[in-house]
Amino acid sequence: MNNAKYPLTTINLFMVIVFTFLLLPGISLADKEIKITDPASVVVIVNRDSNDIAFMDIKTNKIIGRVFLGKNVNPHMAMMSKDGRWVVTGGTRSSKAYIIDVATLTLVKEIPVGFAPEHLAFSPDGRYYYQGNPDDDSVSVIDMVSMTEIKRIPGFAEPLNITFTADGSKAYVGNYGAHWVGVIDVTRHELLKKIHVGEVPQIASLDPERYLGEIKGISNVSISNDGRYLYAADGDLGIVSVIDSREDKVIKQIRVGVDPWRAYMSHDGNYAVVANNGDATISIIDLKKNEVAATLESGPDMMGINFAAGKAFVISSTSGFLYVYDMTSLTSAGRIKIGKNLQIETATTDTAGEKIYLASSTDHSVYVIDGKTEAVTRVANVGLYPWGTHILDSKDNYCH
Amino acid sequence: MLYLPTKIPGRNRYGRRFNAPTSRTLLASSLLLSISVSAQADDNREQLLKRIDGLEQRVMELETTTVLSDPETRVKQIEVFVDAEGTEHDTQVPGSKRRITYQRERVYRRQTINEKISEAMEDAANRNVQLGVDAAIIIQNAQQTRGNDKTADGNFYQLASTDLYFTAGLAQYTMFFADIVGLSGTPPDNEIDGLTLANGYAARLVQQNDLSLREAWLMTELWDQKVSLVIGRVDLTNYFDANAAANDETSQFLSDALVNNPALGLSENGAGMAVVYDPKKSFNFRMGYQQSTSTASNLSDSLFFLAEAGYQLNPFRMGEGNYRVWYREDNTGNAASAFGISIDQKLTAGITLFARYGSAENVTSSNRDKYYSTGLQFASGLGFNPEDTFGIGYAYANPATVEKEKLLEGYYNLAMTEKLRLTFNLTYLQERRVNSSTDAYVIPGMRLQASF
């Protein structure tokens, strides 16, 4: 064969094409190297400023790997699908949803969603991932089979957290910019109902500044262990409304402290603990009686509450303390100093209910707290500005 | 069959189909392909250039209409190791010493203008002296129902009070606080002359129309903030004999007997110190001293020492309860001592039971002065408006002398706005005098209070 018949550049191009075909499968295989075999063995860490999701081994507290999402993505919350196959997160500054393959730690899909996505939830069967877009007043429905946004449900008012019922038929959305809970029909992905949680006091007309200046509505709807009742704390109204999920009606309003953030359900299902940021207290609600069983002093800027070893650990973000409460006697049980000049964020608890994994944003660390001994171990350099953590099947997976 | 993924700008991404080539067709195909690729490349280049132009335009627009381009930085406290040569290391090396220093770190964050403004405002507020105002106007009327001395009967009284609070952070866990108060007006106590004050605000009235420094102290927190140390001109009743339901004349009962335990004996604020040990568990302990005279020539004069132990319980899980026991000694020359208890226990989420008892030595008698009070406070939405509170309280003063005082007060505190409250109160006061006569009064009152 006379190679001179063919121009050199054409042969080179041809060879490149052939080699590319031969090498592609190899590259693809290398990319798909299995890095995590047991999704329950890792803590998922959301790093806002390094724009990545880090995966930390629970046994060794070592970072196994991290998935970079892109510049200025600013991920807010991450959640693992029930089968442990995917981790999803919303990029607040990129207005996209991201799907990560857990086994290979690869970013498999970027999906444009509404403006500034933050909180999210999976449907119990794992088919849908609902992404709340608070600045867009919408919820994006992502089909995990086609990995596309199949619908964007409008009509909310700063939708924050989303809670599915156990049977997956309905999802409840906390509207921080309003005093109602949105009920989504998951079959049709439509806003079915707005549940009015409480009345603004009549005397509010004398105080327009308070109610018109800034609204502090409902950040989350917490569901009881049996799935029957939902608890929606409303910041401006200072109440927790109890909603019967069968009729989607408020059956009781429980007055709590000033500016309640949300209710956190104890693992045994007996109590809900409400963080009242307006007066730096917590209200412990007896879920059998739907009454406040104790109101106890806590710290400023409470961002979350975790349960471990029969205690409640309240995260006081700006003070750097975890306030501890004995959930048997319902009394204060001290506080744990995480560090000085820190801003601690949110945490998850392991499935055994023994250890808490607390994200500390300003020192780029995760602190592991033993619920029983209250010993604290620092895991440094997990990424820049860790904002939250997540463990598959944990009972304390939440975000700000 | 092979699928070659190719991406053509402006079009959807599809795989392009190829048949597996034979050796003869391979060369022909490659030739055709090269021609096709060459033509396509020119086309692609043109389209790419157009897209780059478009993107550059968009970047320019973005940069001119936003202020997000500044790189964010944050100053961080870091730990370094400095060796004998003065070289700084990130990790410990032989002969190096651990040092704390500060360094700027880059924050890879894109913030919105709202976030930037909020941060700047918060930062500025934290650096400034914070000012608070608490102003109140109290109008009362005395209707005498029993007794011979008719001095107060039918008279109206009005007292206006303004507190200016200043707070400033001075160092980590250290703050300065000052309370300057101005009072003007006439409380009923000048004419009723009871064992305790019918208007608790009158306790602050040192001189009419003058501003006076009520408190000025420095507070610092030590040992993982378990211990608070307060030193300066203090009011020890803020730290001792506290009560959740009956401790504040500005929002709860107006009568002084239902604000402080008379057995405490503190008449004036003065130089002093308080140490509070509070590990945020059920138990807390505090002790302190305070001078309680404005005419003292040295710190040893009229000095009161107090100690208190507090415990928090949640009996039968009906709600939290605070139980306090205190002890007082003073060096006023009479070697007087006193002790007391102060309890507040929630019966339900909205109802709080309170009780106080105090017993003080009386140097003129072998008997002791004894003070009792009890009552209920209602809150948590039991009133007309969710933030309203109301209460009823009874106090009995039984000093070692023949004088006695019985007081019953009810109040309703209406939360009009976040900054404005209106309280209606009704007091029944019965005073047994030294000459064994007994006077009784009904004192309706109203308190308008603004806090901001």
Image: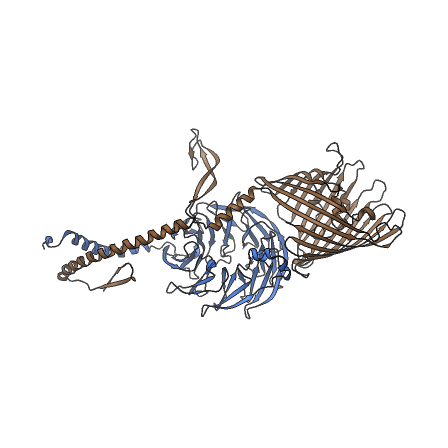
Chain colours: A blue, B brown
Question: Residue B14's image quarter?
Answer: bottom left
The residue furthest left is A2
- Quick one: A103 or A290, which is closer to the camera? A290
Q: Check the image and report above or below for A36 versus A223.
A: above
Q: Position of residue B349 (x, y in %)?
A: 66, 59
Q: Position of residue B61 (x, y in %)?
A: 38, 51
Q: Position of residue A171 (x, y in %)?
A: 49, 65
Q: Is residue B115 left or right of residue B341?
A: left
- Quick one: A195 or B447, which is closer to the camera? B447
Q: Is residue A368 left or right of residue B209?
A: left
Image quarter (top left, top right, bottom left or bottom right) of the N terminus of chain B: bottom left
Q: Position of residue B81 (x, y in %)?
A: 45, 35
| Whether residue B125 can be seen here | yes
Q: Check the image and report above or below for B436 versus A392.
A: above
- Quick one: B95 or B5, which is closer to the camera? B5
Q: Is residue B314 left or right of residue B359?
A: left
Q: How many numbered marks, from 0 up?
A: 0
The residue furthest top is B85
Q: Check the image and report above or below for A125 versus B238.
A: below
| Whether residue A338 can be seen here | no
